[in-house]
Image (cartoon, coloured by chain):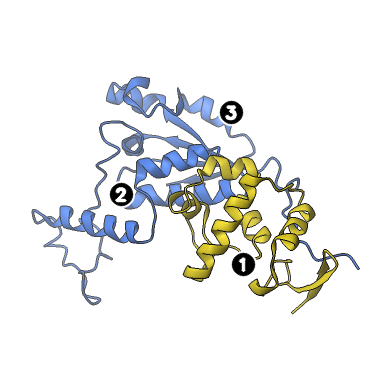
Chain colours: A yellow, B blue
């Protein structure tokens, strides 16, 4: 499994670059991950990322955009505004989680 | 060494377009278009849904909350328990359609997947475009006011062909 250096530290990632060990994640790293994909984190971004982390901790799966709206309370439209084009993948990447597995 | 960062290919996907023709009003035939359209939007792809013939029921205010699933003619239909197929002679029995519909709705809801109208809300929120077929509107004597407010227009077949130049097409 590849190891890559982000924000001056070594983290384990899959072939695409998604973190594989959620325990290596913290906010400082998340900010660096966001920057690497061209996203500047604001308070609104953090709220969604924190929801994803908390939801993953209890469910063991990354929330889909549908779930981020239905359970997290963040409208799909807002997700697309904050994480343009590919919100599900970008949110998961910044949260240090695998890509969502669900279809909807 | 360059860090490994996912390539979300925002530019490479530019210009990819998907057009889905929704021609069926059965509950089970409504979902494939919604699931695929929604997935495409999540990949940054421009999506157009075109509703025609019975697909109109998905966007007609009076009908969209009441789509049905029928086992009639569906030889793959199973009983709720085991792998026993529903005999086709029983499929048209009164109550069978209601039972099959409510079972399917429950299975879909259990997965956290929204009902058809709410799913279309989500697709529009994600930037999807909804279009209604001129001929179907005329056949049903429907105007804009009979359809979801976010349907962008009642358009002709020619309009649709022009609009979807270069798009990938799905007919459902």
Side of B117 where B68 appears, left or right = left
Which chain contains the residue that carries disc 2? Answer: B
* Picture residue at 74% right of the left edge, 56% below the top: A31
Dot label at residue B27: 2
Side of B29 where A56 appears, left or right = right
Instruction: Give x and y (percent) for residue B97.
Output: 17, 53
Which chain contains the residue that carries disc 1? Answer: A
Where does the N terminus of chain B fall, quadrant-wise?
bottom right
* Picture residue at 50% right of the left edge, 63% below the top: A55
Residue at label 1?
A98
- Residue lying farthest to the right in this orientation: B1
Note whether B51 is above or below B79 in the view shown. above
Distance from disc 2 to disc 1, alpha carbons, whole Å, reads 32 Å
Residue at label 3?
B162
The reply to whether callout 1 and callout 3 are in contact (CB within 8 Å) is no
Nearest to N terminus: mark 2 or mark 3 = 2
- Provide the secondary structure element on which disc 1 rests: loop
Asked if badges 1 and 3 are on one and the same chain, I answer no
Q: Residues within 10 Å of mark 3 (few under 14, many from 20)?
A: few
């Amino acid at each position: 499994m590849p190891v890559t250096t982000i924000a001056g530290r070594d983290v384990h990632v899959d072939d695409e670059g998604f973190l594989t060990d959620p325990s290596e994640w913290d906010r400082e790293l998340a900010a660096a991950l966001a920057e690497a994909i061209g996203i500047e984190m604001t308070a609104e971004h953090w709220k969604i990322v924190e929801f994803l982390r908390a939801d993953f901790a209890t469910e063991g799966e990354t929330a889909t955009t549908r779930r981020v709206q239905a359970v997290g309370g963040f409208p799909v439209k807002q997700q697309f505004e904050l994480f343009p084009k590919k919100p599900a993948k970008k949110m998961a990447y910044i949260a240090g989680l695998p890509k969502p597995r669900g279809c909807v | 060494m360059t860090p490994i960062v996912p390539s979300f290919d925002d530019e490479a996907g530019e210009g990819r377009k998907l057009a889905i023709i929704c021609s069926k009003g059965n509950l089970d035939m409504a979902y494939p278009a919604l699931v695929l359209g929604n997935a495409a939007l999540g990949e940054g792809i421009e999506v157009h849904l075109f509703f025609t013939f019975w697909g109109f029921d998905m966007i007609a205010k009076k009908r969209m909350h009441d789509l049905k699933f029928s086992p009639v003619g569906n030889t793959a239909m199973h009983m709720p328990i085991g792998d026993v197929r529903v005999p086709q002679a029983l499929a048209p029995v009164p109550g069978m359609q209601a039972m099959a519909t409510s079972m399917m709705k429950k299975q879909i809801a259990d997965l956290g997947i929204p009902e058809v109208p709410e799913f279309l809300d989500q697709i529009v929120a994600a930037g999807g475009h909804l279009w209604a077929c001129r001929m179907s509107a005329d056949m049903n004597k429907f105007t804009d006011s009979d359809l979801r407010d976010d349907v962008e227009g009642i358009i002709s077949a020619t309009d649709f062909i022009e609009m979807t130049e270069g798009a990938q097409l799905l007919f459902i």
